[in-house]
Image (cartoon, rainbow, N blue to C red):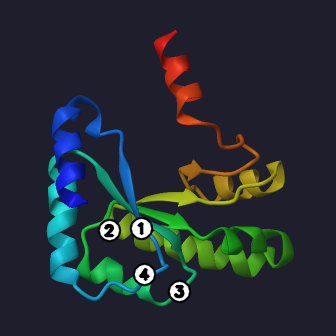
Amino acid sequence: MMKLITQELFRHKQNAHRLTFEILEDHEIKEYEQVAMIFQQLKAFGSKIAIDDFGSGYANYIYLIKLDVDILKIDGSLIQELLNYPERTKMMLNSIKVLADIYGYEVVAEFVSNKEIYDIVHELDITYSQGYYLGEPKPIEEYMNKEQN
């Protein structure tokens, strides 16, 4: 799979910087050196590496130590707690933001589903938001057609 990805990145180098590869929590990483080497190859093309669902499991903190990542995508379950436990959740999100700032990571708040959550995320100075409040997922062709017009 990596061979195919690097071939396609090479063929489309002008767009490689627009790609972000996400680490998912579905499977635990066991071969950190091998994964680090793969990330290095992807980043050589200008692509970025994101940790998806950051804050949902214990493993992703070890990823910060052992892997060269660019983006922390804060788990949607944490973002949704802004409605139930706003003060405690803000403190938790602020601690993630401080950590990200120290290491130079970009931060994305996932599952931003309404204006209230969006406003709080913005107030916390989290740069990027993702969720239904901002738009529903669409086939990539719809985005590509907009760029060509």
In the image, what residue occupies the spot 53% across and 57% down?
A: 108
- Residue flagged by tag 2: what amino acid is it? Tyr
- Measured Cα–Cα span from mark 4 to mark 3: 6 Å
- Measured Cα–Cα span from mark 2 to mark 4: 15 Å
Q: Quadrant of the N terminus?
A: bottom left
Residue 103 got which mark?
Answer: 2
Position of 132 with respect to 23 (left or right) is: right
Q: Secondary structure at mark 1?
A: helix
Q: Earlier in the sequence, mark 2 or mark 4?
A: 4
In the image, residue 8 sits, relative to residue 42, either above or below, namely: above
**Marks 2 and 1 in Cβ contact (< 8 Å):** yes
- Measured as percent of width and height from the top left, residue 72 is found at 45, 65
In the foreground, 76 or 141: 141
**Marks 3 and 2 in Cβ contact (< 8 Å):** no
In the image, what residue occupies the spot 73% across and 58% down?
A: 120
In the image, residue 102 sits, relative to residue 63, either above or below, namely: above
Task: Determine which residue is flagged by label 4.
Answer: 60
Position of 110 with respect to 12 (left or right) is: right
- Measured Cα–Cα span from mark 1 to mark 4: 13 Å
- Residue flagged by tag 3: what amino acid is it? Gly
The image quarter containing residue 82 is bottom right
Residue 54 got which mark?
Answer: none
In the foreground, 106 or 52: 52
- Measured as percent of width and height from the top left, residue 66 is found at 24, 81
**Marks 4 and 3 in Cβ contact (< 8 Å):** yes
Q: Earlier in the sequence, mark 1 or mark 4?
A: 4
Task: Determine which residue is flagged by label 3.
Answer: 57
In the foreground, 59 or 145: 145
